Image: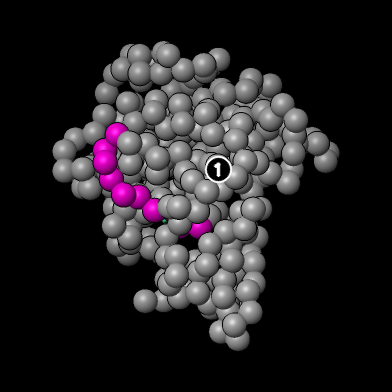
Amino acid sequence: MSERAIFDSLKDLPLPEVRFYPETGSTNQDALDWAAQGAPDLALIVADHQTAGRGRLGRSWFTPPGAALAFSLILRPALPQPDLLPLYSPLGALSVAMVLEQIYALQPLIKWPNDVLLNQRKVCGVLAESLWQGNVLQAIVLGIGINVAPASVPPPDQVLFPATCVEDAVGKTVNRWHLLAEVLKTVIHWRDLLTTPTFLTAWQQRLAFKGDKVRLENPGGETFEGILLGINPFGHLRLKMNDGSEQTFTVGDLKLRPLS
Ligand code: BT5
């Protein structure tokens, strides 16, 4: 792996600073620390190997060396709008899904709110974290992990949901840095469109398990079952419950599983 190849692939993007680490704990942690020290908007951290990659709720994210993409982009919203925070992980998922469609002719779906699936298996996870000073939002760290080569797929007993990688779906090797550049380009394009119907439509069109019976589980173990109808204009998930009523669920720490 050549560091030069990474910087070359990113050279046409408006990134003020890029840090590449052959190995680190978590690029999200690095980016939060860097943001606290004043990193500019669109500062980027990329790692080849994460030893403490993280998911939501203290879960871990597997990133072995030489096989995956793991990166964190620092976003400093010009007008900090905390109510838009729940839309940032879908922004990451939508961007990855669109690139997989456009470049590799794949048919990814987005498992609400933050996973990208290929053939009903997880190929990418997104973790958006925020940095606050008092009650003022300072920065958002958009962390994205993509399984590229087969070695990046965790063993089945280490995952809550089946996993896969881009190369298995494409059937040939994929240039990680090219994929990285395309995803970043797409994130930069869509970040300004979060409040538009176009963003919600693009997300909804790719929503996994639409019309299927699903179960949502909150961190307290409480479960909700219903037919997945779609998302509302705030990005909340809409379910038709067993009694025929419609209920919405905010993007949070809910686990979604198909029941079929
Ligand atoms: C996520 O959390 O899916 C968010 C993952 C975000 C990872 C990126 S990598 C760059 C940046 N730096 C970080 O430290 N994190 C971000 P969640 O929905 O909670 O899913 C976590 C679960 O996914 C784990 O508990 C495993 O079951 C499973 N998992 C772990 N590694 C995986 C992988 N490589 N591929 C597929 N599934 C995985």
**Residue 105 image position (x, y, % from top left):** 26, 41
- Quick one: quadrant of the C terminus? bottom left
Query: Residue sitting at 45 percent across and 56 percent down?
Result: 207
Which color scheme does this rendered protein use? one colour
Quadrant of residue 238 in the image? bottom right
Q: Which region shows up in magenta?
A: 103-112
**Residue 36 image position (x, y, % from top left):** 69, 28
Query: Residue sitting at 50 percent across and 32 percent down?
Result: 187
Query: Residue sitting at 60 percent across and 35 percent down?
Result: 193
Indicate whether 112 appears above or below 66: below
Query: Residue sitting at 42 percent across and 14 percent down?
Result: 12
Whether residue 213 is in magenta: the answer is no
- Left/right placement of residue 231 relative to residue 98 reads right
Query: Residue furthest toward the bottom?
Result: 243
Which residue corresponds to mark 1? 199
Q: Would you say residue 55 is visible in this rendering?
A: no
**Residue 183 image position (x, y, % from top left):** 42, 32
Query: What secondary structure is marked by label 1?
Result: helix
Label 1 CA crowd tier, 10 Å (few <14, some 14–19, many 20+):
many
Q: Nearer the viewer, residue 91 or 41?
A: 91
Residue at disc 1, CB closer than 8 Å to ligand 1: no
- Left/right placement of residue 248 relative to residue 14 reads right
Indicate whether 3 appears above or below 201: above
**Residue 245 image position (x, y, % from top left):** 63, 79
The amino acid at mark 1 is Phe
Whether residue 108 is in magenta: the answer is yes
